Image (cartoon, grey):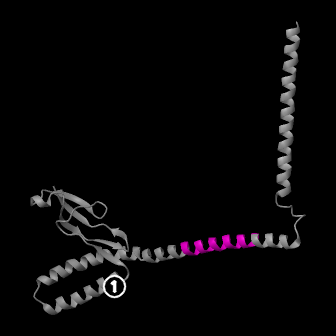
Amino acid sequence: MFKKIFRNMSQENSENKEKDLNQENIQQEQEVVENENETAIPSAEELSPEQKLKEELAAEKDKFLRLFAEFENYKKRTSKERVELFKTANQEVLLALLPVLDDFDRAMAQIAKTEDEALLKGVELIHNKFRDTLKSKGLEQVELKAGDDFNADFAEAITQIPAPADELKGKIVDVVEKGYKLGDKIIRFPKVVLGN
């Protein structure tokens, strides 16, 4: 019986000690928080007028810098978009003129077969002027010739034929229609015949 009483007393003592420790820890934590609050930035009511003005000035400077950076990004983005628009603005007109250029190339090949030098020279001058005008507007020919490796990113294969030579297997045998690009963008892919 005495053992039970002593056990109960010792349990009560240990529980009391734990409660005391918990209360002490809570008090210490509250003191730490109060000390931190005392060393923290004083509230707006406690600031002097100079400090208030400095804080407002710093906030306005930050706001101004962010707005300025955002505006600079906007200017760069719109100028880049404008340049890209100017580069490709002529695309529809140039696409409409490509069949005329093709016809001109075919006519030049036929006129070159005749013996009329004056006719050849006159048509050649007009052809060169037309081609130079299109080139000044940004039109460039996609350079491909027989024997080049085929790349589906830069050409369109319309058919395959047996290769006339072993070195032409898997390569371009003939260019049926020239391709053109406007700046870096291909507006008409060259049509080619592949050897297999």
Magenta: main secondary structure:
helix
Indicate the position of residue 48 as horizontal and vertical percent values. 88, 70
Q: Quadrant of residue 38?
A: bottom right
Q: Residue at x 58, y 75 (%)?
A: 75
Q: Nearer the viewer, residue 78 or 112?
A: 78
Whole-percent x, y for residue 20 in the image: 87, 32
**Mark 1 Cα shell of 10 Å, populated few (<14), some (14-19), many (≥20):** few
> Which residue is rendered at x = 27% and y = 67% of the image?
190
Q: Which of the 4 image quadrants contains residue 109?
A: bottom left
- State the image coordinates of residue 130 (x, y, percent, origin top left): 30, 85
The answer to whether residue 56 is left or right of residue 65 is: right
Can you say whether 186 is above or below 165 in the image? below
Left or right of 178 on screen, residue 110: left
- Residue 126, image quadrant: bottom left
The region drawn magenta spans 59-77
Residue at 46% across, 74% down: 84
Residue sitting nearer the eye, 82 or 192: 82
Q: Is residue 112 left or right of residue 18?
A: left
Residue topped by disc 1: 133
